[in-house]
Image (tube, rainbow, N blue to C red):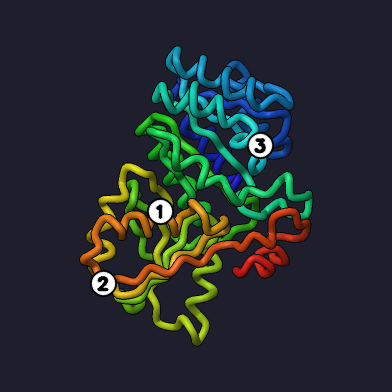
Amino acid sequence: MRNAFIEELVTLARQHPQIALIVGDLGYSVIEPFADEFPDRFINAGVAEQNMTGLAAGMASEGYHVFTYSIANFPTFRCAEQIRNDVAYHKLPVTVVSVGGGLAYGALGYSHHAVQDYALMRTLPNMLIAAPGDPMEVRACMRYLVEHPGPSYLRLGKAGEPNFHDAPPEIAPGRWLRIRDGKEKFVLLSTGACLQIAMEWSMTTEHANRAVYSVPLWSMADKAAQAENLRAREHVITIEDHLHDGGFGSWLLEAKALYQEHDCIVHSVALTPEVCGTVGSQSTLNKLGGL
């Protein structure tokens, strides 16, 4: 996903001279194509994520669309106050990019886990979450975010994720993308890199014949739009590499609570707290956490 991100960012930057990239002293072997082609729009802020976010907000207030880039929770929790006060409240075009969402960097220690980030970012006003399920959805999210500039959070996997689309799909906030045909009354619904897990589950006896959908864009603002999606279903299982509290499943359950006349059952599958404070590979930690 990170390679698709930088490739698409370079392509978009050729068309939009206001696009800039700021990194927190990492991303080497990934960000060089942008830094080499647009050195006047690339800044390494050093290991200073709060300064990075404040700088991004200042540049955004002067007309730039700034992408800040760092690993997992570093561009979110370490500078949450700056994102809230400087970016979200002012509705500035800053896209916070978190590479290695969930437990992708789990082997580097629990400081690198990003399993509470949805809960944090979705509570911020004006914030749009972009959690693509494959590299093609990364490209689609990038195009949407540039066409609709504002506060946004782009949560990427790490590398090696398979493509489930032949081309970047048409996306919109809250829209469900059909990935695998099946019984439309019974759905596996994922966001982010958990799309791969949803596809694997759909091949098992327990979940055979369920349709699989991905939701790469969502926010607090489009919860009400989920009414039609829920009305047409009987049972939806949400899948996410995030803790239960405040995550994607919670978001959909909140949407369902707005329309209690719907009989659709929403079952949230997410990580359990056992992963917190634990070090291991992504697959090992996902298994420990219930995925």
Secondary structure state at the residue bearing disc 1: helix
Q: Which residue is mark 1?
A: 251
Classify mark 1: residues with Cα within 10 Å, few (<14), some (14-19) or many (20+).
Answer: many
Q: Residue at x 59, y 36 (%)?
A: 76
Classify mark 3: residues with Cα within 10 Å, few (<14), some (14-19) or many (20+).
Answer: many
**Quarter of the figure with residue 34:** top right
- Pick whichever, 84 or 140, lies toward us: 84
Q: Residue at x 65, y 52 (%)?
A: 159
**Image quarter of the C terminus:** bottom right
Query: Which amino acid, by three-letter code, is at mark 3?
Result: Phe
**In the shown orientation, is residue 101 left or right of residue 58?**
right
* Marker count (numbered): 3
Q: Position of residue 273 (x, y in %)?
A: 64, 59
Q: Residue at x 73, y 29 (%)?
A: 25
Query: Residue 171, relative to residue 234: is it above or below?
Result: above
Closer to viewer: mark 3 or mark 2: 2
Q: In the image, which disc is placed on residue 263? A: 2
Query: Residue 180, relative to residue 176: is it above or below?
Result: below
Q: In the image, which disc is placed on residue 74? A: 3
State how far apart marks 2 and 1 are (Cα): 17 Å
State how far apart marks 3 and 2 are (Cα): 40 Å
Query: Residue 264, relative to residue 120: is it above or below?
Result: below
Query: Which amino acid, by three-letter code, is at mark 2?
Result: Asp
Query: Which amino acid, by three-letter code, is at mark 1?
Result: Trp
Label whose residue precedes the other's in the sequence (2 or 1)? 1
**In the shown orientation, is residue 175 left or right of residue 64?**
left
Label whose residue precedes the other's in the sequence (3 or 1)? 3
Classify mark 2: residues with Cα within 10 Å, few (<14), some (14-19) or many (20+).
Answer: some
Q: Position of residue 281 (x, y in %)?
A: 75, 60
Q: Residue at x 49, y 32 (%)?
A: 95
